[in-house]
Amino acid sequence: MKVKDIYSYLNELFPCESAVAYDNPGLLVGNSEDEVKKALVALDCNIDIIEIAKKENCNLIITHHPVIFDGLKSVTENTVVYNLIKNNISVISMHTNMDMGKNGVNDALCNVLELENVTEIDDGEGFILRKVSLSPISPENLAKHISDKLGSPVKYIDSGKDIKNILVCSGSGGSYINLAKKLCCDALITADVKHNIFMEAVNSGISVFDAGHFETEDVIVEPLTHMLNKKFPDLQFIPCHFSRIKYV
């Protein structure tokens, strides 16, 4: 099985052309004609992930976050790209196209949180979020539920009213507070929420839950690994949840 075969399948699931304009998904490092021995599936590609790939004898890494996002000004011995090329490891990254695609990151987050009655919502600029309707629940109980399902702390602000409709955006989605208000949502589940967004939420009567960037996106690793192992049963795809981020 070649790198290009796996990329072709992923591009069918999450077309790169559907990514937002600033994004950089695709086969970003490596040779499309290389035969894949084993593949690692992870949220990011950094030096730690490369070492894990080497240990597992993987010559392909599939990530959510693009290993190359902005323009490179140098490729030296301490950089990720240099070490990938040195070790003959290819990288395929599926970013905003996988965030919003069917069975992508936003759907994976809804699934892990056991949220039902999910509909797609266009933000008006080409990005697709999820809206969820559920039986009334207090902000405190929803925060505990999110923390339990993701296995991590949740920072939130309580609007003082029960929640029936939620806007869901994995990763950095604090800017969608106004969209949540426009859609008559009682809450926004996302990550990387700035202080001013929490304050705006108070004034808007919306509960906001910051469940962590890594935590709200790492949920795609297991289902993506499952999809790939099912499609390519003769090739081993290994899920990797390694992160240097610590909590005290």
Image (spheres, rainbow, N blue to C red):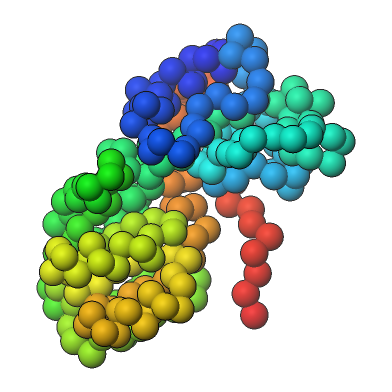
Q: Is residue 109 visible?
A: yes
On the rendered structure, is 82 left or right of 145?
right
Observer-nearest of 83 and 140: 83
Percent coordinates x, y for residue 19 in the rendering = 38, 35
Q: Residue at x 40, y 28 (%)?
A: 16
Q: Residue at x 38, y 38 (%)?
A: 20
> Would you say 246 lies left or right of 113 here?
right
Query: Which residue: 29% across, 85% down?
Result: 202
The quadrant in which residue 161 appears is bottom left
Front-lying residue, 153 or 198: 198
Residue 58: horizontal and vertical position, in percent? 68, 29
Residue 149 appearing in the image: no
188 over 24 or under it: above or below: below
Number of dots carrying numbers: 0
Which x, y percent locates residue 26?
A: 50, 27
Is residue 74 shown above or below 90?
below
Q: On the picture, is 150 further left or further right than 202?
A: right
Looking at the picture, does residue 102 appear above or below residue 17? below
